[in-house]
Image (tube, grey):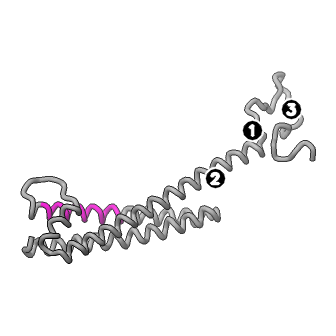
Amino acid sequence: MEDCGVDESLEKLFKSLRKQVGLQRQMLEIVRRERELLVAADFAKIQEVTFSKEALVNSVRKCELERQEVCRLLGAQYQPKEGVVTLGQIIEVLQGVDRQKADELRSTFTALKMLVERVNSQNRSNQEFVESSLVHIGKMKENVLGEGHKHSQTYTPKGKRKTSHTQNSNLVSEEA
């Protein structure tokens, strides 16, 4: 694996991985900021962060496609049969040829995996927070609108409006 084309492809691979690490660091900052904004219920800024997140996701996808193409090219240079070549396989081949590059590639790949796991974990946490908030909002809505009892009706069976719309509401105690 020592010819010029391989070295050039390896450099492209390193560049792509470093770029992905940078993008994932940005993504981690964004999802952490998103959590702060969700807690603060700052809807305008949440929308801004969401747009930033979408743009960053598109950049990550583009960079990942570039990385996959470089891996395919590297695989074609040392493996005659067609197939998917993983970073792990490239690291194995490099291990015997250039241990320093193999170690650098392994550490960059490990950093990338760790960042992706952190971003996914924070996203799950944000999703759980939003879902929990929606449950609480639903309960508050039931209390305020008197929907706490499923059989409550605004009109009587004869079509007359009930006098107290909030009689089933749990917002204020009847004792008060």
Q: Quadrant of residue 101?
A: bottom left
In the picture, which quadrant includes the N terminus? Answer: bottom left
Please tell me whether mark 3 or mark 2 is closer to you in this view. Answer: 2
User: How many angstroms separate mark 3 from mark 2 (CA)?
Assistant: 32 Å
Q: In the visual, does 162 lie left or right of 13? A: right
Q: Position of residue 3 (x, y in %)?
A: 7, 74
Q: Is residue 120 above or below residue 167?
A: below
Q: Secondary structure at mark 1?
A: loop
Tell me where residue 104 sits by quadrant: bottom left
Q: Residue tagged by mark 3?
A: 162
Q: Label 2 is placed on what type of residue?
A: Ser
Amino acid type at mark 3: Lys
Q: What's the distance in space between the residues labelled 1 and 3, CA to CA? A: 15 Å
In this figure, which residue is indicated by the disc labeled 2? 133
For numbered disc 3, what is the local secondary structure? loop
Residues in magenta?
A: 59-75
**Mark 2 touches mark 1? (CB < 8 Å):** no
Q: Is residue 155 above or below residue 47?
A: above
